[in-house]
């Protein structure tokens, strides 16, 4: 598994961007077997043509990927313009299996892949999904359970729903399962910081939190965010969110969900999550400086876990609300990563939801390192 080579191309149409990648991927050895490919929104509709060209030019048979509002390469990110990233690797043929269509119909993994996973032992699954077909996020837990994989990846944020799993597909989940014999480490970085204590939902109806800690939910929110913001709730849109603590995590971890409405008459809050009585929640704020410090924490942790081993390649799946919106211009987010791990081959995209372990996150960054 010595080979990881990444390529990046830009252009107003897919031909130009793809040919730039082809040029950078020339002279790959015959052992090159698996590729990751991500296209920004202007090029995503042509992913099937892009992959056909990459396969023909590189002889890499198996490709997985999808489209996003932006794409990530080593030290750089491209938003709102035609861009393409591709990364080829020489994983042994018996060390991975490409899959697609999980949860599209019967909702189970291909029996052949299930048998391989049981016999081989899966380490990580790189997963791409379509939020329009995903249904319940519980499908991620089911996929992790069926395969034994620790899942990483993200949901398509492109206007085109196409995913690549050797061939074009529009299933709910697709990607590649990779054997535990392939050394991989992963990390998650949050983009929000908690405000105040953890609370209990004491009355709920669907998306509505009616009461928290036995009090009107809106009263608890106002108390936590402070008098200045409480006087003008219009200012909290996109800044204050709800977080659901993850049970059993070995570190402070939570799933962020958007606060989508306020009912002043009932004192209720609407959350982009189906709430139940007894649920635990926190209020969090999106904060650029906190996101930067948490990204650095994750990078330091991964470097320590790498124990001096060479990082051969990387995948990065990060929220579409991060990047220039949270870290600033000039590829600041990807620049932080490059300064920490070096100019290693890297491919990734800006997602509409990040996949880590067996859960769907928001406002996070998921970094996967191949050692």
Image (cartoon, grey):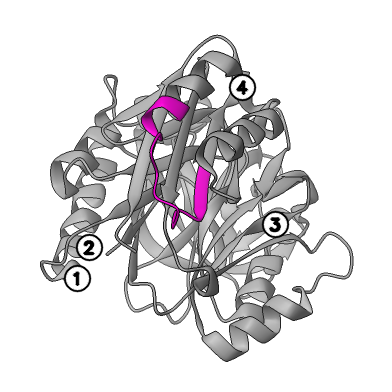
Residues at marks 1 and 4, CA–CA distance in whole angstroms: 36 Å
- Which region of the structure is painted magenta? 22-36
Q: Earlier in the sequence, mark 1 or mark 4?
A: 4
Q: Which residue is mark 4?
A: 43
**Magenta stretch: helix, strand or loop mostly:** loop
Residue 364 visible in the picture: no
Mark 1–mark 3 CB contact (< 8 Å):
no
Q: Which residue is mark 3?
A: 173
Residues at marks 2 and 3, CA–CA distance in whole angstroms: 27 Å
Q: Which residue is mark 2?
A: 302
Q: Is residue 29 magenta?
A: yes
User: Is 184 left, or right, of 145 in this rendering?
Assistant: left
In percent of the image, x 31 and y 38: which residue is there?
287
Residue 128 visible in the picture: yes
Q: Which residue is mark 1?
A: 305
In percent of the image, x 49 and y 34: which residue is there?
320
As displayed, is residue 74 above or below residue 165? Answer: above
């Amino acid at each position: 598994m010595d080979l990881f080579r990444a390529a990046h191309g830009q252009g107003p149409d897919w031909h130009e961007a793809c040919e730039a990648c082809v040029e950078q991927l020339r002279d790959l050895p015959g052992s090159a077997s698996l590729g990751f490919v991500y296209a920004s929104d202007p090029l995503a509709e042509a992913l099937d043509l892009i992959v056909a060209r990459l396969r023909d030019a590189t002889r890499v048979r198996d490709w997985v990927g999808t489209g996003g509002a932006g794409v990530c390469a080593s030290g750089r990110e491209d938003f709102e313009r035609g861009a393409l990233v591709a990364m080829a690797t020489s994983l042994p043929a018996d060390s991975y299996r490409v899959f697609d269509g999980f949860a599209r119909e019967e909702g189970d993994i291909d029996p052949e892949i299930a048998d391989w996973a049981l016999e081989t032992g899966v380490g990580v699954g790189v997963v791409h999904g379509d939020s329009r077909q995903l249904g319940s996020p519980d499908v991620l837990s089911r996929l992790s359970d069926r395969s034994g994989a620790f899942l990483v990846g993200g949901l398509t944020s492109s206007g085109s729903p196409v995913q690549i799993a050797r061939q074009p597909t529009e299933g709910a989940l697709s990607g590649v399962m990779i054997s535990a014999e392939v050394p991989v480490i992963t990390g998650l970085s949050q983009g929000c910081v908690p405000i105040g204590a953890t609370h209990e939902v004491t009355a709920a109806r669907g998306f509505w939190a009616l009461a928290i800690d036995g009090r009107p939910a809106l009263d608890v929110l106002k108390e936590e965010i402070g008098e200045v913001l409480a006087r003008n709730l219009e200012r909290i849109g996109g800044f204050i969110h709800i977080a659901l603590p993850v049970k059993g995590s070995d570190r402070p971890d939570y799933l962020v969900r958007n606060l989508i409405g306020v009912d002043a008459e009932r004192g209720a809050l609407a959350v982009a999550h189906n709430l139940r009585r007894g649920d635990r929640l926190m209020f969090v704020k999106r904060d650029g400086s906190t996101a930067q410090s948490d990204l650095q924490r994750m990078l330091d942790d991964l470097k320590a876990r790498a124990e001096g081993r060479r990082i051969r390649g990387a995948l990065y799946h990060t929220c579409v609300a991060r990047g220039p919106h949270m870290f600033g211009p000039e590829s600041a987010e990807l620049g932080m990563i490059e300064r920490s791990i070096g100019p290693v081959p890297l491919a990734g995209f800006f997602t509409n939801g990040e996949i880590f372990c067996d859960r769907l996150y928001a406002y996070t960054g998921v970094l996967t390192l191949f050692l």
